[in-house]
Image (tube, helix red, strand yellow):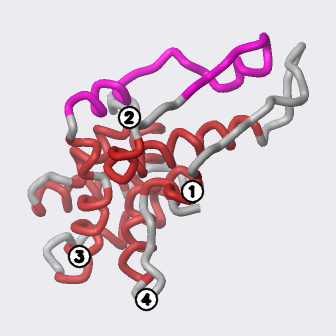
Amino acid sequence: IDAIGKALIVSSDHEPHWGDSARQLVVCLIAHICTTRGEIPNLPRVRQIIGLPRDEFTLYMMKARENPLPLVRDSAGMFCNATSNEVGSFINAAAEQLNFLLVPSIAHFLSKSDFDFSALRRKKTTFYLIIPPRELDSYARLVRMIVQAFFNEMSRAPSGNARETVLTILDEQAKLGY
């Protein structure tokens, strides 16, 4: 989850505190919604929570403190005072960097999936992710997240009859901030 958080929230070199705290918030929320019955486990839901009015956000984070997962429980408390200037700045930083999730086509694309990167090891498959160069800046965080999800899966040991290797070619990855 942390790697996905790093792909989504990019910290600036001169003031990493804001980006790092925004990333901690996003990681906390991803972990919470993925482990809470009745929640919708997808990134548009994370952005929706971040966009709640501050009093509703505070209540949500207070409930998140009851999550048994230490990653959530220990982080959620830091964000319970959403009306403070500092916490509000963390929320704003996260919201700003996740604004691409408000684009209806992206929200729909990320709302559910039956695609599994581990399938690339089971049979010969070609996967292309093509973003027109003029739109790469607009979709950089989405592409970073997809590339990170791919690498997360490929870094796991293959299981069953899965192949050991998958040929990966990345072009223009520097444009993604790597």
Q: Which of 12 and 91 lies nearest the eye of the viewer?
A: 12
- Segment tinted magenta in the rendering: 104-128
Query: Which residue lies under the disc numbered 1?
Result: 2
Q: Nearer the viewer, mark 4 or mark 1?
A: 4
The verdict on residue 105 being magenta is: yes
Foreground pick, 168 / 41:
168
Residue at 85%, 35% in the rendered image: 157
Q: Give the CA separation, mark 3 to mark 4.
A: 16 Å
5 is higher (above) or lower (below) than 42: below
The residue that mark 4 highlights is 14
Q: To which residue does mark 3 refer?
A: 89
Q: Residues within 10 Å of mark 1 (few under 14, many from 20)?
A: some
Q: Which residue is mark 2?
A: 42
161 is higher (above) or lower (below) than 168: above
Which residue reaches farthest bottom?
Answer: 14
What amino acid type is highlighted by mark number 4? His
Locate residue 90 relative to residue 27 in the image: left or right.
left
Query: Label 2 is placed on what type of residue?
Result: Asn
Whole-Å distance between the Cαs marked 2 and 3? 23 Å
